[in-house]
Amino acid sequence: MTKSHSILALLLLAAVSSSALAQRGGNNAATQAQADLEARTPKLNVTEEILPLRIPGHTIGETEGVSRNKAGHLFVYSRTGWGGSSRGGTAARLFEFDAKLKFVKEWLPDSYGASFAHAVRVDPEQNVWVVDEGSNTVVKVDPSGLVKMVLGRKPESIDWWEEFTERGGKDTNLHPNGTMGTFNRPTDVAWGPDGSIFISDGYNNSRVVKISKDGVWEKAFGTYGTGDGQMNIPHGIAAGYGHVYVADRGNRRIQVFDYNLNFEKYITGMGAPWSVQVTPKYIYSGDGTGKIYRFDHNGKLLGWAQTSQGQGQTGCLIHSLHAEGDNVLYKGACSLWNVEKITFKD
C-alpha cells in the first residue's frame, strides 16, 4: 500500500467512525456525564415480553415503527421484503396484528412509497400514518385502508441515476435547509388537538414542520447544527398536553415547543433520544442502547430502565416507542427483529 493510499484509508476510517458515533448520538465525555447522572437516579423495574408475532410465509424483519389503535391492534412498519432500500426499491412493509397478536393483513401492499421504513402512528381518528425515510413521504391511510393524504414526494430513481451516475454529479450539501412541500428523510409524525400535523424531518433536513389538518404547510423550525434553533437528526416526535416534543437525537436533548412551533425549552438527561412519547403523567425517551428514561412534564428525570439485554445485539435496541398509558410501552428495534411490550412495575 502506498503512503497516499494509507492516508486515504485512515481518512475513510475516521469518516466511518465519526458517522457511527453520530448514529449512537454522543461522545466519550457525554457518555460519562450520562453514566454519572444515571448513577444518581433511581433505576426502574420493568418486565419485558417479546411478542410472538408471526406472518404466514414471511419474516417480520427490522421493526422500525410500532403503534396500536383503540381496538388494541398492533401495527408494525418493518424493513423487510425483496427490493432495494430506497430510490425505487420496496423494502418496507406494514403489518397489522389483532389484540391477540394474530396476523390480520398487510397494509398498502406494493406501495410506491414503501421504501425504507421509519415510523407508523395511529391518530385519534384511527387513521394509520406511515413515515417512510427512503421515499420522503408521509402517507395517511383511513381505517378501511384507503389512502387519504400523501405528504412529500418520492425521489425518482431515473433522476438520481442521471444526475449522480450518468453525469457524475456530487451531493455536497448534506444538510440543506428544507423547502415547503418536501421532506428529506423524515422520521416521525404527531398531531395537535385541532388535527394539526407535526413531522420531524429528519436525517438530511434538520427541522420540525407544522401542517394543517387538511394538508396546508404552515411553518417549519430548525436548521442543522448544535445551537439554539438547530437540530441534529430530529428522530422522533410527540405532541400532547399543550406541547410538541422533538427528539433531537444527535444533540442529546428533547426540544419542547408550543402548538405553533414556538420554542419553549430543552429537556436533557436521556442519552441520545431515538424516540419520545408523552402520557398523562410522564414523558418517555428511548435510547438506542435500550435504555428508557422517564421524566415528569416539567422535564425532571425521575428514573430509567435498561431493556433488551441478552439478545445478541448492543445497538439500535430501541428505534421507536408507542406509549399505552403511563406504565406500558411497546418498542420496535432495528437489530432485534421483534416487538417488545415493556411494563413498568411501579
Image (cartoon, rainbow, N blue to C red):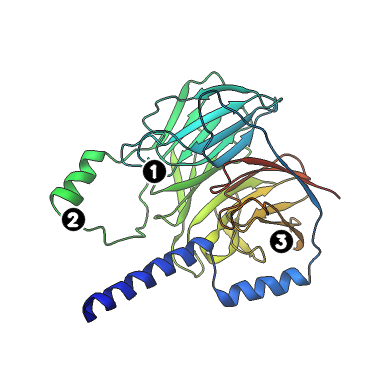
- Residue 300 appears anywhere in the view: yes
Image marks 2 and 1: residues in contact by CB distance under 8 Å:
no
- The image shows residue 345, relative to residue 130, as above or below, that is below
- Which label's residue is closer to the chain start, 2 or 1? 1
Where is residue 17 shown, x and y percent of the image? 43, 69
In which image quadrant can residue 158 be found?
top left
* Amino acid of disc 1: Gly
Q: Is residue 342 left or right of residue 243?
A: right
Residue type at the position of mark 3: Gly
Q: Amino acid at mark 2?
A: Gly
Q: Which mark is residue 169?
A: 2
Quarter of the view holding residue 127: top right
Furthest residue to the left?
167
Comparing labels 1 and 3, the label whose residue is closer to the camera:
1
Q: Nearer the viewer, mark 3 or mark 2?
A: 2
- Quadrant containing the N terminus is bottom left
Residue 216: image location, x then y, percent: 44, 37
Q: Position of residue 214 (x, y in %)?
A: 48, 32
Q: Find numbered disc 3 in the image and state the secondary structure of the residue it sits on.
A: loop
Query: Judging from the image, what secondary structure is the residue with disc 1 in?
Result: loop
* Residue placed under numbered mark 1 in the picture: 134
Front residue of 325 and 257: 325
Q: Residue at x 35, y 50 (%)?
A: 179
Q: Which mark is residue 299?
A: 3
Q: CA–CA distance between discs 2 and 1?
A: 20 Å
Say what secondary structure mark 2 lies in: loop
Q: Is residue 215 visible?
A: no
* 342 to the left or right of 26: right
Q: Mark 1 vs mark 3: which is more N-terminal? A: 1
Marks 1/3: CA–CA distance = 33 Å
In the image: residue 268, left or right of residue 152? right
Front-most of residues 249 and 218: 249
